[in-house]
Each structure stands twice: as C-alpha cells, then as structure tokens.
Image (cartoon, rainbow, N blue to C red):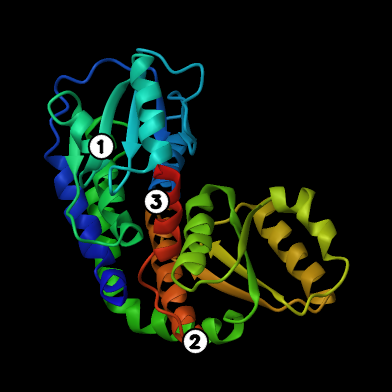
Amino acid sequence: MKQHIENFAQYLQEGYQIGQSIDISNLKHYENIVFVGMGWSAMALDLIKTLLDESDSSLPSQVIREYTVPAWVNEKTLMITASYSGNTEETVSAMHHGLAKGATMIALTSGGELKKIADGNHILATMPTGIEPRAAMPYSLGIQLALFEKLGHISDIAPALTRFASRTETNTDRIISETETIAQKIAHRMPFIYSVTNHTAVATRTEQQLQENSRMLCHSHLIPEHNHNELLGRQEGSDIVDVLRMIPATLTDKQSLRITLTRQVLDERNIPQYTIHMEWETLLESILSGIYQADWLSYATAMVRGVDPSGMELIEWLKGELKK
C-alpha cells in the first residue's frame, strides 16, 4: 500500500493519458449524467461531480450507490459506470438498469462483467490490472478528468496535475511527518472527519481509507450541514472521539466563521481536535492535496495500530456470500 500512495501522482497522470486516448467521436447527445459506482469508485465520481457543478452548472448530474438508477434516466442520459474489478454487484445491476432505459454508457474498469458488456458496444476505458482497488482510484480519476476535459465541461487539467506532482515530490516528507503525528493521537480512538461541502470527496476518502487501511471506525460530516444536527450531540465530552478537520486554503466568510465557532464548541467540551490543511489554489489541486494527505494518514495510522493496510478479506467474503 505504501508504494501505491507514493505513486499516487504517477497513477493520476497515467490515468489522464488513458483518458486522452478515448474515442468519443460517436458519443450521442446527452442532457444529464448519472455516475454509477461503489466505495472508492463512487468517491472519484463525487470529485468529478464537484468539478462539474463548479464549472458547468447547466448539466444536471447525480452519483448513484445502488442497484438501480433514478426514474429520470433515459436515452438522453450519459452513464459513467466505474468498477475496478468490473464485477461489483450493485454497479453491474445499475449498469443493466441504465442500459435498459436507453442511457449511453462509458465504462471504467480493469475487466469482469463491466468490460465484457462495454467492449465493442460502448465506450470503454481499461485500467491496469494487479492493483488493490482502492489504490487504483487515481487511475479512474485521471481517466475521468481527461474525459470531461475532452467533452468540454472542465479545463486546464494537465497543468494542475503537473503542479500537483511537483508539489507532492517537494512536500511528501513533511506530509508523512505531520500525518504520523496525528496518527499517534487518533489510532485508538474514533475520528470524526469534518470538511466543507465542495470537498466532500476529501471527507469521504479520509473516512474510507481509515476504515479500510487502518481497520478502524470513523465518521465524516460537512460544514455547514453538521451545524444543523450533529453539533447538538456535543453536549458532553467524549473519551473515544477526536475531530479531524480537512480545511482548504480558500474559505468563504461564512465557512470560516462556522469552523471557528465549531472549534470553540468542541474546545469547551474538551474534545481533541486536529487540522490537515489543503494548501493549493485551484479546487482540483486542493481536493487532490486532501486526498493525498488522507492516504498517508491512513497508512501511518495502520502502522500505529499494527495492522496490514493491504487486503480485503472480510469484504471479499461478503461478496462471495452474496454471489451464492
């Protein structure tokens, strides 16, 4: 797992190159997008949806983590279907449901049922095999960044990826040191991950990686929604809960004020708090910064907890039982 995290920027750029080679010349006209995936695949889809919402609000889109697609999906829907194995049960089911409703599909996979259905009949982007699925996330993300750049919905991706790669090379030693310090604090507690709405993908990835790589329970929530419900649960301090904030460099005045006041509430209740800063300028680079740091945090926490961050035995068992 450590090597995969070290190669994050490389995988991202290789995925971008794969995406640039996709032939979209015969893609039908579409008026909305449905993203279909589970786990890390859906998280990458969340990130793309965030960028689309920021750059092209005229194009409705929704991320689906289910066996079916919404009733509004039709022949004017572009369906992006992502599954590393190509056999994710929920994703394959939703794929068939969407195709039956006339949606146009672009599939991102390394093989399996998804590749079998897409190959020769739909647009297919093939990811390299032999990688742990959650470590393959940058490939899927890079492919989609190139794809939606080619479709004209987002722009300036290549310079952003180059800057990200350069900065990771410069900052990785510092990131490892800082995340190792936080890992010592949270490793045997239950972290609550807080970020802001346009960094949903960061909060989700942090939660996923701590759960999967570090084998621990955690929870994520977003500002401002957190302030409307979860804050009331902070009437008493807790000896099992820490708060980890994932904070971008650019905040609105309201976001900044809410974070300050939330910190005050938690301080008054003696709840330990830590912050990871996403330092870079554009929205894409800020999100990538947060995800990269979250991956290192999960690895460091796994080391403190004495667990192997690789392998998915329990999830594979569940998939096997469902298949029976």
* Label tally: 3
Which quadrant of the figure contains the N terminus?
bottom left
Indicate which label's residue lies in the foreground, 2 or 1. Answer: 1
Indicate which label's residue lies in the foreground, 3 or 2. Answer: 3
Q: Position of residue 200 (x, y in %)?
A: 53, 51
Residue underneath mark 2:
304
Q: Is residue 136 left or right of residue 32?
A: left
Q: Reading the chain from its start, which is encountered first: label 2 or label 1? A: 1
Residue underneath mark 1:
113
Q: Quadrant of residue 22?
A: top left
Q: Is residue 178 left or right of residue 221?
A: left
Q: Secondary structure at mark 3?
A: helix
Q: How far apart in space, not on screen, are marks 3 and 2 (Cα)?
A: 31 Å
Q: Position of residue 160 (x, y in %)?
A: 28, 55
Which quadrant of the figure contains the C terminus?
top left
Q: Reading the chain from its start, which is encountered first: label 3 or label 2? A: 2
Q: Secondary structure at mark 2?
A: helix
User: Residue 320 — which label?
Assistant: 3
Please tell me whether residue 131 is drawn above or below residue 114 in the rendered image. Answer: below
Task: Kindly identify the amino acid type of the residue bearing the numbered disc 1.
Answer: Glu
Task: Kindly identify the amino acid type of the residue bearing the numbered disc 2.
Answer: Val
Q: Reading the chain from its start, which is encountered first: label 3 or label 1? A: 1
**154 or 76: nearer the viewer:** 76
Q: Quadrant of residue 271?
A: bottom right
Task: Kindly identify the amino acid type of the residue bearing the numbered disc 3.
Answer: Gly
Please tell me whether residue 323 is drawn above or below residue 303 in the rendered image. Answer: above
- For image coordinates 58% across by 48% down, the residue present is 197
Q: Position of residue 152 (x, y in %)?
A: 27, 30
- For image coordinates 36% across by 43% down, the residue present is 88
Packing grade of label 1 (10 A; few <14, some 14-19, many >=20) is some
